[in-house]
Image (spheres, grey):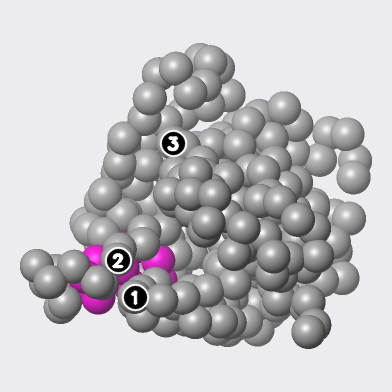
Amino acid sequence: MKSNEFYKSPVIITGGGNGSGLQIVKNFLELGAHVYSLDIKFKKKNIQKSKKLEQVKIDLSKSKEIIKFSNYIFKKEKNIKCIVNNAGITLDQSSNTLDVEKYWDETFDINVKAPFLIVNHLKKKLNKNSTIVNITSISGRIAMKNNPAYNSSKAALSALTRSLAFDLSEIGVRVNSVSPGYIKTNMTKKSYLSKKKRKSRTDRMMIKNFGDSKDIANAVVFLASSQSSYINGEELVVDGGLLKKGI
């Protein structure tokens, strides 16, 4: 990619406070981008202060807060180089005390509705040099036990990616997604720390280990850059070969 492609360019990243989202933030900062990192909470120790980084506390399940942020961006920026919809939640439905309706609504509000609203409210700031990258999951393609809302929401986000790619192609905006497998983050911590669970998961992979957040961040930067200029509406699977492994 061009060394200055993202220099001073506005990049919006949801769920940038930890995990893969934090690494995506770091990657874009290293490329010189001006990053808006959105999350409901941030830990000071996670990242050094930078004039190119704005951490925005926001509850993405609330439409009013998304509208407020969009209005803020409209006043500050002429255009947006990239939007990365990374924020996502997963809840285990196996608990007997779980409020099923709340569980379903919260999952879809964060994982599907928020990405749509962010793009919809900010699309006037996008142009032919802009890109959108959604973070989906292999859970949108295969069943994961006791989490139908998460599985369904990630499948919906994949469909949303294709739909937005079609609609926004009229103004030259590309929309793609990165689909992670088992990456070492807080979301997969229990599976990784359990020898039994870790083995059962790595046995399904061609590359016999969990991925790193950098694997996801690098894929995001590629899809956001001009190096992927002829790729649109695609889902790049980063799972160590889990989905493609045969018998």
Q: Is residue 25 left or right of residue 71?
A: right
Quarter-wise, where is residue 172 in the image?
A: bottom right
Front in this rendered view, residue 201 or 66:
201
Q: What is the x, y in percent for residue 116?
A: 43, 70
Which sits earlier in the primary sequence, circle 1 or circle 3? 3
Q: Residues within 10 Å of mark 3 (few under 14, many from 20)?
A: many
Query: Element type at marker 1?
Result: loop
Q: Find residue 17 and name its label.
A: 3
Q: CA distance from mark 2 to mark 1?
A: 6 Å
Q: What is the x, y in percent for residue 186?
A: 44, 44
Quarter-wise, where is residue 31 in the image?
A: top right
Residue depth check, mark 1 versus mark 3: number of the one nearer the observer: 1
Quarter containing the N terminus: top right
Q: Which residue is mark 2?
A: 92
Which sits earlier in the primary sequence, circle 2 or circle 1? 2
Q: Are marks 2 and 1 in contact (CB under 8 Å)?
A: yes
Q: Residue at image x 52%, y 74%?
A: 139
Q: Find residue 146 and name its label.
A: 1
